Amino acid sequence: DPARSEDEKKSEETELFTKYYTEWKEGSQREQSYKTIPRFYYRLPAEDEVLLQKLREESRAVFLQRKSRELLDNEELQNLWFLLDKHQVPPVSGEEAMINYEAYLQVGEKAGPKCKKFFTARVYAKLLHSDPYGRISIMQFFNYVMRKVWLHQTRIGLSLYDVAGQGYLRESDLENYILELIPTLPQLDGLEKSFYSFYVCTAVRKFFFFLDPLRTGKIKIQDILACSFLDDLLELRDEELSKESQESNWFSAPSALRVYGQYLNLDKDHNGMLSKEELSRYGTATLTSVFLDRVFQECLTYDGEMDYKTYLDFVLALENRKEPAALQYIFKLLDMENQGYLNVFSLNYFFRAIQEQMKMHGQEPVSFQDVKDEIFDMVKPKDPYKITLQDLVNSCQGDTVASILIDLNGFWTYENREVLVASDNDSSSTADLDDT
Protein backbone atom coordinates (compact mmCIF):
# COMPACT_ATOMS: atom_id res chain seq x y z
CA ASP A 1 0.00 0.00 0.00
CA PRO A 2 1.60 3.26 -1.09
CA ALA A 3 -0.10 5.05 1.80
CA ARG A 4 2.07 3.10 4.35
CA SER A 5 5.12 4.89 5.53
CA GLU A 6 8.68 3.57 5.07
CA ASP A 7 8.97 3.07 8.83
CA GLU A 8 5.89 0.84 8.97
CA LYS A 9 7.22 -1.33 6.15
CA LYS A 10 10.58 -1.71 7.90
CA SER A 11 8.90 -2.56 11.18
CA GLU A 12 6.77 -5.28 9.51
CA GLU A 13 9.83 -6.67 7.72
CA THR A 14 11.75 -6.92 11.01
CA GLU A 15 8.75 -8.63 12.66
CA LEU A 16 8.47 -11.22 9.88
CA PHE A 17 12.23 -11.82 9.85
CA THR A 18 12.24 -12.34 13.64
CA LYS A 19 9.24 -14.71 13.41
CA TYR A 20 10.71 -16.86 10.61
CA TYR A 21 14.19 -16.84 12.11
CA THR A 22 12.86 -17.95 15.52
CA GLU A 23 10.85 -20.77 13.92
CA TRP A 24 13.83 -21.91 11.87
CA LYS A 25 16.18 -21.77 14.85
CA GLU A 26 13.85 -23.80 17.07
CA GLY A 27 13.41 -26.39 14.33
CA SER A 28 17.13 -26.71 13.63
CA GLN A 29 17.86 -26.95 17.35
CA ARG A 30 15.42 -29.84 17.59
CA GLU A 31 17.07 -31.62 14.66
CA GLN A 32 20.73 -30.68 15.18
CA SER A 33 21.16 -29.74 18.78
CA TYR A 34 24.77 -29.07 19.79
CA LYS A 35 24.18 -31.75 22.43
CA THR A 36 24.36 -34.42 19.72
CA ILE A 37 27.93 -33.42 18.81
CA PRO A 38 30.20 -35.90 20.60
CA ARG A 39 32.52 -34.40 23.15
CA PHE A 40 36.13 -34.79 22.06
CA TYR A 41 38.06 -32.65 24.55
CA TYR A 42 38.34 -33.43 28.23
CA ARG A 43 40.47 -31.06 30.24
CA LEU A 44 42.97 -32.76 32.53
CA PRO A 45 42.65 -31.63 36.16
CA ALA A 46 45.35 -29.18 37.25
CA GLU A 47 47.86 -30.11 39.97
CA ASP A 48 46.01 -28.12 42.63
CA GLU A 49 42.64 -29.79 41.80
CA VAL A 50 43.31 -32.65 44.22
CA LEU A 51 39.72 -33.93 44.36
CA LEU A 52 39.35 -34.04 40.58
CA GLN A 53 42.70 -35.81 40.24
CA LYS A 54 41.71 -38.39 42.86
CA LEU A 55 38.36 -38.94 41.14
CA ARG A 56 40.09 -39.44 37.79
CA GLU A 57 42.59 -41.87 39.32
CA GLU A 58 39.83 -43.90 40.99
CA SER A 59 37.65 -44.00 37.87
CA ARG A 60 40.63 -45.21 35.78
CA ALA A 61 41.40 -47.94 38.33
CA VAL A 62 37.76 -49.09 38.24
CA PHE A 63 37.78 -49.02 34.42
CA LEU A 64 40.98 -51.13 34.28
CA GLN A 65 39.55 -53.60 36.82
CA ARG A 66 36.42 -53.95 34.68
CA LYS A 67 38.56 -54.53 31.57
CA SER A 68 40.58 -57.10 33.49
CA ARG A 69 37.41 -59.00 34.47
CA GLU A 70 36.44 -59.19 30.77
CA LEU A 71 39.55 -61.28 30.05
CA LEU A 72 39.55 -65.09 30.06
CA ASP A 73 41.06 -66.57 33.24
CA ASN A 74 42.99 -69.87 33.37
CA GLU A 75 39.89 -71.95 34.09
CA GLU A 76 38.03 -70.42 31.13
CA LEU A 77 41.02 -70.99 28.84
CA GLN A 78 41.17 -74.66 29.94
CA ASN A 79 37.45 -74.99 29.23
CA LEU A 80 37.94 -73.47 25.77
CA TRP A 81 40.74 -75.93 24.99
CA PHE A 82 38.54 -78.84 26.17
CA LEU A 83 35.67 -77.68 23.88
CA LEU A 84 37.97 -77.25 20.87
CA ASP A 85 39.48 -80.68 21.42
CA LYS A 86 36.01 -82.24 21.74
CA HIS A 87 34.89 -80.69 18.42
CA GLN A 88 37.95 -81.53 16.33
CA VAL A 89 37.16 -82.78 12.82
CA PRO A 90 39.13 -85.71 11.36
CA PRO A 91 41.42 -86.51 9.63
CA VAL A 92 44.38 -85.23 11.65
CA SER A 93 46.74 -83.12 9.50
CA GLY A 94 50.29 -84.22 10.36
CA GLU A 95 50.15 -84.02 14.15
CA GLU A 96 47.71 -81.10 14.17
CA ALA A 97 44.12 -81.53 15.37
CA MET A 98 41.82 -79.56 13.02
CA ILE A 99 38.36 -77.96 13.17
CA ASN A 100 36.00 -76.85 10.38
CA TYR A 101 33.90 -73.68 10.30
CA GLU A 102 30.67 -75.36 11.40
CA ALA A 103 32.27 -76.96 14.48
CA TYR A 104 34.13 -73.70 15.16
CA LEU A 105 30.80 -71.83 15.35
CA GLN A 106 29.38 -74.51 17.67
CA VAL A 107 32.33 -74.07 20.05
CA GLY A 108 31.76 -70.30 19.87
CA GLU A 109 28.14 -70.82 21.02
CA LYS A 110 29.18 -73.01 23.97
CA ALA A 111 32.32 -71.14 25.06
CA GLY A 112 30.48 -68.25 26.70
CA PRO A 113 30.14 -64.49 26.10
CA LYS A 114 33.81 -63.66 26.87
CA CYS A 115 34.94 -65.79 23.92
CA LYS A 116 32.44 -64.41 21.42
CA LYS A 117 34.86 -61.86 19.93
CA PHE A 118 37.31 -64.64 18.93
CA PHE A 119 34.80 -66.71 16.97
CA THR A 120 34.38 -64.56 13.89
CA ALA A 121 34.64 -65.33 10.19
CA ARG A 122 37.56 -62.89 9.99
CA VAL A 123 39.64 -64.77 12.61
CA TYR A 124 38.83 -68.10 10.93
CA ALA A 125 39.89 -66.76 7.52
CA LYS A 126 43.10 -65.35 9.00
CA LEU A 127 44.09 -68.81 10.29
CA LEU A 128 42.95 -70.71 7.17
CA HIS A 129 45.94 -71.93 5.19
CA SER A 130 46.23 -74.86 2.82
CA ASP A 131 44.05 -77.53 4.41
CA PRO A 132 42.18 -79.38 1.59
CA TYR A 133 39.05 -79.62 3.78
CA GLY A 134 38.98 -75.88 4.59
CA ARG A 135 39.79 -76.44 8.28
CA ILE A 136 42.05 -74.57 10.70
CA SER A 137 44.49 -75.88 13.31
CA ILE A 138 43.02 -76.01 16.82
CA MET A 139 46.45 -75.30 18.32
CA GLN A 140 46.99 -72.23 16.10
CA PHE A 141 43.57 -70.85 17.04
CA PHE A 142 44.17 -71.47 20.75
CA ASN A 143 47.60 -69.80 20.56
CA TYR A 144 45.93 -66.82 18.83
CA VAL A 145 43.44 -66.51 21.72
CA MET A 146 46.22 -66.86 24.31
CA ARG A 147 48.29 -64.16 22.58
CA LYS A 148 45.31 -61.77 22.48
CA VAL A 149 44.56 -62.38 26.18
CA TRP A 150 48.24 -61.84 27.05
CA LEU A 151 48.35 -58.58 25.06
CA HIS A 152 45.26 -57.24 26.82
CA GLN A 153 46.59 -58.31 30.23
CA THR A 154 49.90 -56.59 29.52
CA ARG A 155 48.17 -53.48 28.23
CA ILE A 156 46.14 -53.26 31.45
CA GLY A 157 49.31 -53.91 33.50
CA LEU A 158 51.18 -51.11 31.72
CA SER A 159 48.17 -48.77 31.93
CA LEU A 160 48.27 -49.01 35.73
CA TYR A 161 51.62 -47.17 35.56
CA ASP A 162 50.31 -44.53 33.15
CA VAL A 163 49.99 -41.75 35.72
CA ALA A 164 48.76 -39.15 33.21
CA GLY A 165 46.18 -41.59 31.80
CA GLN A 166 47.02 -40.50 28.25
CA GLY A 167 48.12 -43.84 26.78
CA TYR A 168 51.86 -43.33 27.19
CA LEU A 169 54.55 -43.98 29.81
CA ARG A 170 57.19 -41.51 30.92
CA GLU A 171 60.67 -42.70 31.92
CA SER A 172 59.79 -42.77 35.63
CA ASP A 173 56.58 -44.77 34.90
CA LEU A 174 58.48 -47.43 32.94
CA GLU A 175 61.18 -47.54 35.64
CA ASN A 176 58.49 -48.32 38.25
CA TYR A 177 56.97 -51.00 36.00
CA ILE A 178 60.30 -52.79 35.46
CA LEU A 179 61.38 -52.43 39.10
CA GLU A 180 58.18 -54.15 40.25
CA LEU A 181 58.56 -56.78 37.51
CA ILE A 182 62.06 -57.91 38.66
CA PRO A 183 60.83 -60.20 41.51
CA THR A 184 58.55 -62.06 39.04
CA LEU A 185 61.44 -62.96 36.67
CA PRO A 186 63.35 -66.06 37.92
CA GLN A 187 66.29 -65.30 35.59
CA LEU A 188 66.99 -62.15 37.63
CA ASP A 189 66.93 -63.90 41.02
CA GLY A 190 70.73 -63.63 41.36
CA LEU A 191 70.84 -59.84 40.93
CA GLU A 192 72.06 -57.91 43.97
CA LYS A 193 69.52 -55.40 45.29
CA SER A 194 72.21 -52.71 45.01
CA PHE A 195 72.36 -53.34 41.23
CA TYR A 196 68.57 -52.91 40.70
CA SER A 197 68.75 -49.20 39.88
CA PHE A 198 71.49 -49.82 37.25
CA TYR A 199 69.53 -52.77 35.85
CA VAL A 200 66.33 -50.70 35.56
CA CYS A 201 68.26 -47.85 33.88
CA THR A 202 69.82 -50.33 31.39
CA ALA A 203 66.44 -51.90 30.57
CA VAL A 204 64.52 -48.61 30.26
CA ARG A 205 67.15 -47.08 27.93
CA LYS A 206 66.51 -49.73 25.29
CA PHE A 207 62.80 -48.88 25.19
CA PHE A 208 63.44 -45.14 24.99
CA PHE A 209 66.35 -45.31 22.54
CA PHE A 210 64.30 -47.22 19.95
CA LEU A 211 60.72 -46.11 20.69
CA ASP A 212 61.25 -42.40 21.40
CA PRO A 213 63.40 -41.23 18.44
CA LEU A 214 62.31 -37.59 18.88
CA ARG A 215 63.34 -37.71 22.56
CA THR A 216 59.99 -36.50 23.89
CA GLY A 217 60.49 -38.36 27.17
CA LYS A 218 57.43 -40.58 26.72
CA ILE A 219 56.45 -43.74 24.79
CA LYS A 220 53.03 -44.90 23.65
CA ILE A 221 51.86 -48.06 25.42
CA GLN A 222 50.72 -49.24 21.98
CA ASP A 223 54.32 -49.02 20.69
CA ILE A 224 55.63 -50.95 23.70
CA LEU A 225 53.16 -53.75 22.95
CA ALA A 226 53.91 -53.75 19.21
CA CYS A 227 57.70 -54.16 19.55
CA SER A 228 59.47 -57.34 20.69
CA PHE A 229 61.23 -55.83 23.72
CA LEU A 230 58.51 -56.83 26.18
CA ASP A 231 58.66 -60.42 24.86
CA ASP A 232 62.44 -60.41 25.47
CA LEU A 233 61.94 -59.04 28.97
CA LEU A 234 59.21 -61.55 29.86
CA GLU A 235 61.31 -64.38 28.38
CA LEU A 236 63.24 -64.09 31.66
CA ARG A 237 60.33 -65.90 33.35
CA ASP A 238 61.72 -69.09 31.81
CA GLU A 239 63.93 -70.78 34.40
CA GLU A 240 65.52 -73.01 31.73
CA LEU A 241 66.61 -70.18 29.40
CA SER A 242 69.71 -71.25 27.43
CA LYS A 243 73.08 -69.50 27.80
CA GLU A 244 72.91 -68.33 24.14
CA SER A 245 69.45 -66.80 24.67
CA GLN A 246 70.66 -65.01 27.79
CA GLU A 247 73.71 -63.57 26.03
CA SER A 248 71.66 -62.27 23.08
CA ASN A 249 68.92 -60.81 25.32
CA TRP A 250 69.67 -57.19 26.34
CA PHE A 251 67.46 -57.58 29.44
CA SER A 252 69.15 -60.70 30.89
CA ALA A 253 71.35 -60.45 33.99
CA PRO A 254 74.58 -61.48 32.14
CA SER A 255 73.91 -58.89 29.42
CA ALA A 256 73.16 -56.05 31.88
CA LEU A 257 76.22 -56.95 33.97
CA ARG A 258 78.38 -57.07 30.81
CA VAL A 259 77.35 -53.53 29.78
CA TYR A 260 77.75 -52.13 33.30
CA GLY A 261 81.06 -53.99 33.74
CA GLN A 262 82.39 -52.42 30.51
CA TYR A 263 81.42 -48.99 31.83
CA LEU A 264 83.27 -49.58 35.12
CA ASN A 265 86.36 -50.87 33.26
CA LEU A 266 86.45 -47.78 31.06
CA ASP A 267 86.10 -45.47 34.08
CA LYS A 268 89.79 -45.48 35.05
CA ASP A 269 89.59 -42.60 37.54
CA HIS A 270 86.48 -44.13 39.22
CA ASN A 271 84.53 -40.87 39.27
CA GLY A 272 81.40 -42.57 37.86
CA MET A 273 81.70 -40.72 34.53
CA LEU A 274 83.61 -41.24 31.28
CA SER A 275 85.92 -38.70 29.69
CA LYS A 276 86.63 -38.73 25.95
CA GLU A 277 89.99 -40.39 26.65
CA GLU A 278 88.32 -43.12 28.73
CA LEU A 279 85.62 -43.74 26.10
CA SER A 280 88.27 -44.06 23.37
CA ARG A 281 89.09 -47.54 24.74
CA TYR A 282 85.54 -48.72 24.02
CA GLY A 283 85.28 -52.03 22.09
CA THR A 284 88.45 -52.63 20.06
CA ALA A 285 89.69 -49.10 20.89
CA THR A 286 89.63 -48.21 17.19
CA LEU A 287 86.95 -45.47 17.08
CA THR A 288 88.44 -42.32 15.56
CA SER A 289 89.09 -39.30 17.79
CA VAL A 290 87.14 -37.12 15.30
CA PHE A 291 84.04 -39.27 15.82
CA LEU A 292 84.50 -39.26 19.62
CA ASP A 293 84.79 -35.44 19.51
CA ARG A 294 81.36 -35.36 17.84
CA VAL A 295 79.91 -37.72 20.47
CA PHE A 296 80.97 -35.32 23.23
CA GLN A 297 79.76 -32.27 21.27
CA GLU A 298 76.28 -33.65 20.56
CA CYS A 299 75.44 -35.90 23.52
CA LEU A 300 74.46 -34.82 27.01
CA THR A 301 77.58 -34.48 29.18
CA TYR A 302 78.39 -33.10 32.63
CA ASP A 303 81.53 -30.94 32.72
CA GLY A 304 82.62 -32.67 29.52
CA GLU A 305 82.08 -36.20 30.89
CA MET A 306 79.47 -38.81 30.00
CA ASP A 307 77.18 -40.51 32.53
CA TYR A 308 75.87 -44.09 32.41
CA LYS A 309 72.56 -43.20 30.72
CA THR A 310 74.31 -41.35 27.87
CA TYR A 311 76.78 -44.24 27.59
CA LEU A 312 73.86 -46.70 27.18
CA ASP A 313 72.56 -44.71 24.17
CA PHE A 314 76.08 -44.82 22.71
CA VAL A 315 76.32 -48.62 23.20
CA LEU A 316 72.82 -49.25 21.81
CA ALA A 317 73.67 -47.22 18.69
CA LEU A 318 77.00 -48.94 18.04
CA GLU A 319 75.74 -52.47 18.82
CA ASN A 320 72.66 -52.14 16.56
CA ARG A 321 74.05 -50.25 13.56
CA LYS A 322 71.52 -51.80 11.16
CA GLU A 323 68.54 -50.34 13.05
CA PRO A 324 67.05 -47.00 11.86
CA ALA A 325 67.18 -45.51 15.39
CA ALA A 326 70.90 -46.35 15.68
CA LEU A 327 71.57 -44.94 12.20
CA GLN A 328 69.71 -41.77 13.19
CA TYR A 329 72.01 -41.42 16.23
CA ILE A 330 75.19 -41.94 14.15
CA PHE A 331 73.94 -39.80 11.25
CA LYS A 332 73.39 -36.85 13.59
CA LEU A 333 77.06 -37.11 14.63
CA LEU A 334 78.29 -37.38 11.03
CA ASP A 335 76.11 -34.46 9.89
CA MET A 336 78.37 -31.83 11.50
CA GLU A 337 76.61 -28.76 10.15
CA ASN A 338 73.12 -30.14 10.75
CA GLN A 339 72.27 -29.88 7.03
CA GLY A 340 70.20 -33.09 6.90
CA TYR A 341 72.64 -34.79 4.50
CA LEU A 342 76.24 -35.97 4.13
CA ASN A 343 78.28 -34.63 1.23
CA VAL A 344 81.80 -35.33 -0.06
CA PHE A 345 83.25 -32.82 2.43
CA SER A 346 81.73 -34.51 5.50
CA LEU A 347 82.71 -37.99 4.27
CA ASN A 348 86.29 -36.78 3.70
CA TYR A 349 86.39 -35.10 7.13
CA PHE A 350 85.67 -38.39 8.91
CA PHE A 351 87.63 -40.65 6.57
CA ARG A 352 90.83 -38.57 6.99
CA ALA A 353 90.91 -39.75 10.62
CA ILE A 354 90.75 -43.40 9.41
CA GLN A 355 93.68 -42.69 7.03
CA GLU A 356 95.70 -41.19 9.91
CA GLN A 357 95.03 -44.25 12.07
CA MET A 358 96.17 -46.51 9.22
CA LYS A 359 99.47 -44.57 8.99
CA MET A 360 99.94 -44.90 12.76
CA HIS A 361 99.52 -48.68 12.45
CA GLY A 362 102.00 -48.78 9.57
CA GLN A 363 99.33 -49.60 6.97
CA GLU A 364 99.23 -48.15 3.48
CA PRO A 365 96.41 -45.50 3.51
CA VAL A 366 93.55 -46.09 1.08
CA SER A 367 92.54 -43.35 -1.38
CA PHE A 368 89.53 -41.34 -0.21
CA GLN A 369 88.34 -41.03 -3.83
CA ASP A 370 87.92 -44.83 -4.05
CA VAL A 371 86.12 -45.07 -0.71
CA LYS A 372 83.84 -42.14 -1.56
CA ASP A 373 82.84 -43.79 -4.88
CA GLU A 374 82.19 -47.10 -3.10
CA ILE A 375 79.98 -45.39 -0.48
CA PHE A 376 77.88 -43.61 -3.11
CA ASP A 377 77.61 -46.88 -5.11
CA MET A 378 76.45 -48.75 -2.00
CA VAL A 379 73.89 -46.17 -0.91
CA LYS A 380 72.63 -45.03 -4.36
CA PRO A 381 71.18 -41.77 -2.92
CA LYS A 382 68.34 -39.92 -4.67
CA ASP A 383 70.62 -36.89 -5.05
CA PRO A 384 73.99 -38.09 -6.48
CA TYR A 385 75.89 -35.54 -4.33
CA LYS A 386 74.08 -35.89 -0.99
CA ILE A 387 73.34 -38.84 1.28
CA THR A 388 70.34 -38.42 3.61
CA LEU A 389 69.43 -40.56 6.61
CA GLN A 390 66.55 -42.03 4.58
CA ASP A 391 69.01 -42.96 1.80
CA LEU A 392 71.12 -44.84 4.36
CA VAL A 393 68.08 -46.68 5.78
CA ASN A 394 66.69 -47.55 2.33
CA SER A 395 70.04 -48.86 1.08
CA CYS A 396 70.33 -51.42 3.96
CA GLN A 397 74.06 -50.51 3.91
CA GLY A 398 73.95 -47.82 6.60
CA ASP A 399 75.78 -49.98 9.14
CA THR A 400 78.66 -50.61 6.68
CA VAL A 401 78.93 -46.91 5.76
CA ALA A 402 78.97 -45.92 9.45
CA SER A 403 81.67 -48.50 10.25
CA ILE A 404 83.86 -47.31 7.34
CA LEU A 405 83.73 -43.71 8.58
CA ILE A 406 84.04 -44.01 12.36
CA ASP A 407 85.94 -47.19 13.23
CA LEU A 408 89.31 -48.41 11.87
CA ASN A 409 88.38 -51.98 12.78
CA GLY A 410 85.06 -51.60 10.93
CA PHE A 411 86.87 -50.19 7.88
CA TRP A 412 89.47 -52.97 7.96
CA THR A 413 86.70 -55.62 8.13
CA TYR A 414 85.01 -54.01 5.11
CA GLU A 415 88.29 -53.73 3.13
CA ASN A 416 89.17 -57.37 3.78
CA ARG A 417 85.65 -58.79 3.48
CA GLU A 418 86.56 -61.12 0.57
CA VAL A 419 89.61 -62.51 2.39
CA LEU A 420 87.52 -63.00 5.57
CA VAL A 421 84.72 -64.79 3.67
CA ALA A 422 87.28 -67.06 2.00
CA SER A 423 88.96 -67.89 5.33
CA ASP A 424 85.53 -68.59 6.88
CA ASN A 425 84.79 -71.01 4.04
CA ASP A 426 88.22 -72.65 4.47
CA SER A 427 87.70 -73.12 8.20
CA SER A 428 84.20 -74.55 7.68
CA SER A 429 85.46 -76.99 5.02
CA THR A 430 88.30 -77.98 7.40
CA ALA A 431 85.69 -78.57 10.07
CA ASP A 432 83.75 -80.75 7.63
CA LEU A 433 86.91 -82.79 6.98
CA ASP A 434 87.46 -83.13 10.73
CA ASP A 435 83.90 -84.39 11.11
CA THR A 436 84.47 -87.04 8.46
Image: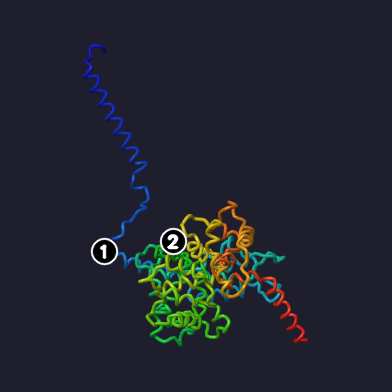
Looking at the image, residue 294 sits to the left or right of residue 430; the answer is: left
Q: Nearer the viewer, residue 115 or 210?
A: 210
Q: Nearer the viewer, residue 251 or 314?
A: 314
Residue identifier under label 2: 214
Label located before the other in sequence (2 or 1): 1
Tag 1: amino acid: Glu
Residue 262 position (above or below residue 66): below
Looking at the image, residue 105 sits to the left or right of residue 113; the answer is: right
Residue 12: x percent and y percent? 25, 23
Looking at the image, residue 370 sits to the left or right of residue 210; the answer is: right
Which mark, by number, is residue 308? none
The residue mark sitting in front, 2 or 1, is: 2
Q: Are marks 2 and 1 in contact (CB under 8 Å)?
A: no
**Residue 75 visible at all:** no
Residue 347: x percent and y percent? 55, 60
Q: What kind of element bears circle 2? A: loop
User: Whole-Å distance between the Cαs marked 2 and 1?
Assistant: 27 Å
Q: Nearer the viewer, residue 13 or 57?
A: 57
Residue 398: x percent and y percent? 57, 63
Choose top left, top right, bottom left or bottom right for residue 410: bottom right
Residue 219: x percent and y percent? 43, 65
**Residue 106 visible at all:** yes
Which mark, by number, is residue 47? 1
Q: Nearer the viewer, residue 297 or 329?
A: 297
Residue occupying image coordinates x 34% and y 41%: 30
Is disc 2 surrounded by few (<14), some (14 to 19) or many (20+) residues within 10 Å? Answer: few
Residue 36 position (above or below residue 400): above
Image mark count: 2
Q: What kind of element bears circle 1? A: loop
Is disc 1 surrounded by few (<14), some (14 to 19) or many (20+) residues within 10 Å? Answer: few
Tag 2: amino acid: Leu
